[in-house]
Amino acid sequence: MSTTVAASPAWTIPDYLEVSDEHLAINGTDALALVREHESPLFVFSAPRIKRNIERLRKAGESVQHPIRFFYASKANSNMAVLKTVLESGIDVEVNSGGELFKALRIGFRPDQIIFNGTSKSAGELDDAVRAGIYAINVDSIYEIGLVEEAAKRVAAADGKLVNPARIALRLVPEIGTRSHLGLQTALLTSKFGISSSEVLDAFRRGLQNPDLIHVCGIHIHVGSQTPDVEPFAEAFRSMWEHLVKIHDETGHRLEHINLGGGIPVNYLRDRSQADQLPEHERDMLGADLEPSAVLAEALRVARESAREAHAEHVLEHTTIVLEPGRSVIGDAGLVLTTVLNMKQRPETGDVWLLTDAGYNIMLSMNNYKWYYHTISASRAGEPHDSEYKVAGPLCDSGDVYFDIERCGRLPDYRKLPANVQPGEVLALLNCGAYSLAQMFHYNGRPLPAAVLIKDDGTPVVIRRRDTYDDLITNDVW
Ligand SMILES: Cc1ncc(COP(=O)(O)O)c(C=O)c1O
């Protein structure tokens, strides 16, 4: 591959994101050729990168010499081809709705490879999960334990039998803060999730009441997404571990797994050339480079210490650790290619505006969390990115901009791109694989973009066809 600059830009990743003949290349495929063939805007995913990310997790699991299972958090991206790639990589899946359960089963995950999370599961969703006999339904309240029991009774009545009691895990909310955005923190008592520490024992007693209908198999916490430090994970693990030991001592019931949730971060600031415009805490969070092996090692160190003190090493030995990684599997394995359609210069401010075809309807977190996606020119990837532009999307909404319109400094005011960008130039927003495609919507009557997956052999295949205008009205009745 001919690299056209002496030193590769900091965003490059060997054999994945590179500069080739001045253009951005993704696993060797020319980004501009993709846009020519599949139009703009376009999502591009990399199967080799997904697999490499999963391999990194698996190696982390092996490094701690303890039974570990990874359940990919499919809400991060549940495109069927992405799910298939994850399935082929040999890990399991976590779902958050009947729809995601349907997709996971349809693509071929076995029921014992599936965990179902969520605060408000419907009777129909619980029936589906119980009937399928999945690995765990994570219940969010004591009340929901009763709902699962009802579902088990309904399934038994409808099918003439319940093959196995429904397997449940209790989701806890132990009041653990992280240095991520407040909206991404889920282990605080002010968050909507889980059962508080003071209720845990009651929840277990309730869960053990009808063993013919339900089996309590685990305990769960998700501290939040993009968690930059190991401490919250270790604290969460200690909390769950201590509950597990207490339950074992009091009831003799042995839980099979502790589920530490997701939250392993992605480094969004591999290229820090614009990071100086962001506040320090934002830089720390977005640029976190936490190794999953460090998370597991610290969680186990804490648990082993506590197990020794409680003479409960034998209990720990038989407890599988579950992780639900989403972002760390798919975040840096996807990007958005977008074309500059319009430009203007404001005489009063001197700002040069680039108006693209990628709005927040395809990257919601850039709007609601002011999430930073490093932006480069895919047309001139090897040139110095040292000219400042105001960049904005196509929506008729003043919030559809690539900077923080509320001036809270959560996004850089200007994006740095090569000099003299003109309409027709293709830009790339990097690290857009997680929580983007999954959150797209038709605002402003905009057909949703296509997505392409670069396969292991370097062939690009369409994994989501571009919407047509007919797709915009397909569910409307008039
Ligand atoms: C319960 C649960 N598990 C796993 C995840 C995945 O988190 P992440 O994508 O940060 O790994 C989430 C996301 O918020 C979640 O709510």
Image (cartoon, rainbow, N blue to C red):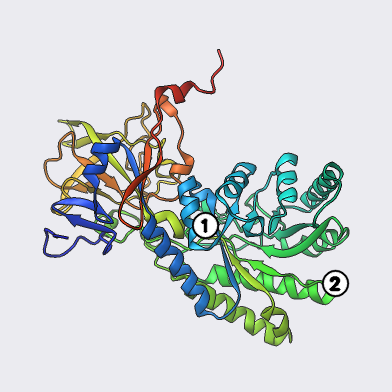
The CA span between labels 2 and 1 is: 37 Å
Residue 104 in the image: above or below residue 397: below
Q: Position of residue 8 (x, y in %)?
A: 18, 62
Residue 247 in the image: above or below residue 105: below
Residue 183 in sight: no
Instruction: Find out whether the residues at labels 2 and 1 contact each other: C-beta distance under 8 Å.
Output: no
Camera-side mark, 2 or 1: 1
Residue placed at 67% from the left, 81% from the top?
Answer: 317
- Label whose residue precedes the other's in the sequence (2 or 1): 1
Residue 251, numbered circle: 2
Residue placed at 48% from the left, 70% from the top?
Answer: 292
Q: Position of residue 444 (x, y in %)?
A: 41, 25
Question: Horizontally, is 252 left or right of 20 in the view?
Answer: right
Q: Amino acid at mark 2?
A: Thr
Q: Position of residue 377 (x, y in %)?
A: 21, 47
Q: Amino acid at mark 1?
A: Leu
Residue 87, numbered circle: 1
